[in-house]
Image (tube, helix red, strand yellow):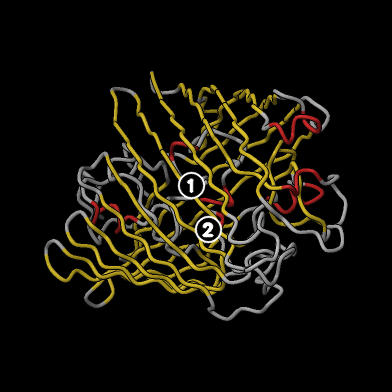
Amino acid sequence: MPGMQMPMTSSTEASMQMDMPMSATTLIEAQLNHASSGTSIEPASTPVPMLMSSHGGWMLMLHGSAFITDTQQSGPRGADKLFSTNWIMPMAQHQLGPGQLTLRAMFSLAPATVTDRQYPLLFQQGETAFGKPIIDGQHPHNFFMEVAALYDIHLGERSLLSFYAAPIGDPAIGPTAYPHRLSASEDPLAALGHHQQDSTHIAYNVLTAGLTFNSVRIEASGFHGAEPSEQRWGFQPSPNGHAIDSYSTRITFSPRPNWTAQYSVAHITSPETLYPNEDQQRQTASIMYNRPLHNGNWSSTLIWGRTKSLTAQSNPLIAQSKENSYLLESLIRFRTRNYAWTRIESAGRSNELLLTPGSPLPPNFEEFPIGHVAAYSFGYDRDFRLIPHLLTAPGAQFTTYTTPSALIPTYGSHPFGAALFIRFRISQ
C-alpha cells in the first residue's frame, strides 16, 4: 500500500499491527491511501493512526475517534451540556483490474449522544432542530456520514485517474472537513466557519472524477445540494428530493510532502431548509502544513471560506450578500503523548443570531450579514493507553470571543467558554 514502509504480501492473512501510523511521500500516494473523507487530501506526511490488517488480498483498515465533553459557557446566551461527538471509519482496498478499488464507510452515533439535536456553541448557526433555526448550537452529524466506492487507475508513473461515487459522501469542495483533519483532531467542538468552509462533507448522491499529475490534482463533482434533514439515522432524502443539482470543482497543489493547498468553487442549489428558494456560491482556499518531529508531529491549517447568496432580493442588505470566514488552527504533539493546540477564527454571522434560540423563524424574515465574531481557543490533552488499540486522553479547552458591535447587547463584549473532555481514539 502506498506510504507504508514495509512490504505486504498476499500470504499475510492474520491481523497485523503497523509500527507507525500510515503516511505517504507524494500527492499520488496520499490520494491512494484515501484516509480522509471524500477525496480531500492532507499533506502526504500526515500520520493517520489506525488498525490495519490483510486478508485474502484485501487491505483492511479501521480508524475513529470519540469525545465525551462537558461544556460551560458564560454570558446571557451561554449554556452548559454533557454530550459526545464521535465517528468510526472502516475501509477496505483491493487490486481490481488495472486499478485499486477502495470501499469506505463512516458512521456516527452523535444522533443519540447529542440530545435535543444540538450542543451549545456560542455564535454558531446553521441547519435546524425541531423545525427551528439552530442558534448558538451545533447540530449532530448523520449516522451515515459516508458510504462510498473509489477507483484509481495509474495512467503512468506520475499520473492517476480517480473516480468516487457515494449515495452519502463528500464532494470536491474545501479542505478536509474539521472532524477528519489532523490539525483539528484534538478540538472537541466544531469550527464557527464550518458552514462557509466544509459543511458539504455530508451530501447526497455524489459523483467525482479527478486527475492527478505529479503535484497537481484537478477534480469535478456533481451532487445534491440540499443539506441533510433532521432525521439523521437513515438514508433520508432532503426536503427537495435527491437529484444531482449542484456542482463543484477543486484544484489541489502539493509541491512537497509537508504542504498541501487547494482552491475550490461550487454552485449549491437550495442548501438551507429555512431558505429553500436560495441558491449559493461557495468558494474556499486553504493551506495545510504538516511536519513530523522527533517523538511528535506539528500540523497547521489556514482556511478562507465564502458563501454568497445567488438569490436576488429587494433589500440591498440582502441582495448578493456574502459571508466570509477565516480560520487558523495548529496542533503539536510532543514527547509522544502530549498535545497542545489553538484555533483562531473570524467568522461572518447573520442577523439570525438576534432571534431567540429555540423560536421559529418569524414570518417574512430576511437574513443578512451582521458582522464578524472572533474566537480564540487553546487546549491541551495527554494520551493514556488503558486497553489495547485504544488511546484515551483527558483534556481541557478554553475559548474567548470578541463580539461585533451589533451583537454586544445580546451577548456581551467578551463571552467565553470552557470544555472538559475525554477523547478516545483507535490506534495501532
Does 245 sit above or below residue 357?
below
In the picture, the quarter occupied by the N terminus is bottom left
**What residue sits 44% from the left and 36% below the top?**
183
Closest to the observer, 214 or 37: 214
Going by the numbered disc 1, the residue's amino acid type is His
Report whether residue 368 is seen: yes
Tell me how far mark 1 sits from mark 2, CA to CA: 10 Å
Check disc 2 and report the residue beneath it: 201
Q: Which mark is residue 421?
A: none
Element under label 2? helix
**What residue sits 29% from the left and 52% below the top?**
30
**What residue sits 75% from the left and 38% below the top?**
120
Q: Position of residue 321 (x, y in %)?
A: 60, 56
On screen, residue 152 versus residue 336, left or right, reads left
Q: Residues within 10 Å of mark 2 (few under 14, many from 20)?
A: many
Q: Position of residue 149 (x, y in %)?
A: 42, 70
Closest to the observer, 173 or 339: 173
Check disc 1 and report the residue beneath it: 180
Q: Are marks 1 and 2 in contact (CB under 8 Å)?
A: yes
Report whether residue 79 is seen: no
Going by the numbered disc 2, the residue's amino acid type is His
Q: Position of residue 315 (x, y in %)?
A: 70, 60
Q: Earlier in the sequence, mark 1 or mark 2?
A: 1
Quadrant position of residue 224:
bottom right
Closest to the observer, 26 or 399: 399
Does 284 sit above or below residue 339?
below
Task: Name the residue at the left extreme.
Answer: 157
Q: Position of residue 245 (x, y in %)?
A: 54, 78
Does 12 sit above or below residue 394?
below
Element under label 1? loop
